[in-house]
Image (cartoon, rainbow, N blue to C red):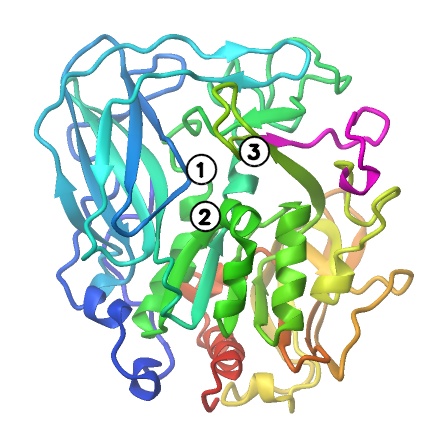
Amino acid sequence: MVVAGAWSIGGQPADASTALGSNPIVAENAHPGTLSWQIPAPGYRIANDLGGQIKGYASATSVNVGGRLDFLVSVNPAQPYRIAIYRLGWYRGAGGRLLLLTPFLPGIHQASCASDLRTGLAQCAWRPSYRLSVPRTWVSGLYVAVLSSMWRYQNYVPFTVRDDTGRQPLLVVQPVATYQAYNNYPRGTGKSLYDFNSAGGRTMSGGTRAVKVSFDRPYAADGSGGLFVYEHPLVRWLEASGYPVSYVTDVDLHARGTMSRRYRGIVFSGHSEYWTAPMRNTAEAARGAGVGLAFLGANDAYWQARLEPSRARQPNRTLVCYRAAALDPVIDRRLVTVRWRDAPVRRPEQLLLGMEYSNMVRGSAPFVVVNARSWIYAGTGLRDGQALPGLIGGEADRIDTSAGMPLALSRILLGRSPYRTRRGGRDIANAVVYVAPSRASVFAAGTLSWNLALGAPGSIDPRVQRVTHNVLNRMLGLPA
């Protein structure tokens, strides 16, 4: 269950809207919020995948303001259900705002999803159940549809509302490709791109994992994907701080890459592990055009993936990652789905981030500060060697001296943090910032716990908030 209760974000920097003028994010978050986006509501239970009491998915990962989005919903047994749609944000600590509540709708039990035994691809062909016409008054953001059945079961369907005008200078990218890579719907019998949580027979991968997964299926368990792990804490802090942001998914970055140059800064949130070549090219082109980049996680841009159409020929609905060059039939060998650093691709993620993934972290470890006199630490009061407890967690990155480095006018090492690996070894986590020849600043946090320190109850650290504030303000041309 998502953490309950209203809470204080604590220690946030001065409202960014003071310098940037009013923006839709500030006006939106002035509305009263609610805790009712959290499920299960009193008297309800979370639907499970095998029972399928109520599950659903959206026809696209995002929709532009004024556009339309279909929800495809199955209830078991057939019964009425309703949809409540919430925008996630700050909302004075409530974390969400109710924007639409449907009457009870007639529900049907949809067909089982077809599976390909060779690739492991499971793809649903459900009939559209409800069409949302997004009002032009809605503000770009991360949204959830809460599905509630007459028999009192609930599940989420996440989606993003874009604003394709590009009026806000800061863009947040939601890593839905990585959500889908780990999605093993239906949990217990389904497959992800990983053996550890895939069931059933062997595929062409040689294990139980799939080499293709579909967006045309619900997310497992409560249906939220990875939304509440890393993205929601970040969004609450950003919007509490008044930053002028708009939101897209990484599928949008793949499909509509030229839009990235409209912004002053792009934030890659949390765990953004699976990138297509167009995503990578878009990020590099933005950096080359002077757009700042902030990687507020770890293990970013680790696997090259591809996006293919669905069986119904809808573009970008199938995520492909063979993880082995010998298995991948693609003709253009630059697009082989292996690690970016590996042959035949040989585009180490360090050439973009300034460092690259190293290890999984056992428990957590302190973040140890170096170069505390850097502009990035202004206002934190931190000193060299000072430790920020618990900030290294999940997965961690470090500089690989055997790999190439990005061209830079300047480069600053920000952290050198020892930790125990998941397998009992020892490693060092780094954090870095560099300035590209275009004068774009690129920051990489190197830990999956960074966003938690921005806005997750019990993990908030005002010094981490201040560092992130300095990074974003540098991108936006504002004082630290």
User: Residue 433's quadrant in the figure?
Assistant: bottom right
Quadrant location, the N terminus: top left
Q: Which residue is mark 1?
A: 225
Q: Position of residue 47 (x, y in %)?
A: 31, 22
Marks 1 and 3, how far apart at CA:
8 Å
Residue type at mark 1: give it.
Gly
Element class at badge 3: helix
Whether 11 is among the magenta residues is: no
User: What amino acid is labelled 3 in the image?
Assistant: Tyr
The magenta segment is: 319-335
Q: Does the magenta-highlighted stretch encompass residue 328?
A: yes
Q: Residue at x 82, y 50 (%)?
A: 341
In x, y percent, where is residue 99? Answer: 16, 48
Tag 3–tag 2 contact (CB < 8 Å)? no
As measured in the structure, the alpha-carbon distance from the residue carrying label 3 to the one carrying label 2 is 13 Å
The residue located at (18%, 57%) in the rendering is: 137
Considering the numbered disc 1 on the image, is that residue within a helix, a strand or a loop?
loop
Q: Which residue is mark 2?
A: 229
- Count of marks placed on residues: 3
Please tell me which residue is depicted at 41% across the width and 27% down the height of the picture. 221
Left or right of 278 on screen, residue 186: left
Could you tell me residue 320's position as x and y percent?
65, 31
* Secondary-structure class at tag 2: helix
Residue under pointer 3: 182
Q: Quadrant of residue 107?
A: top left
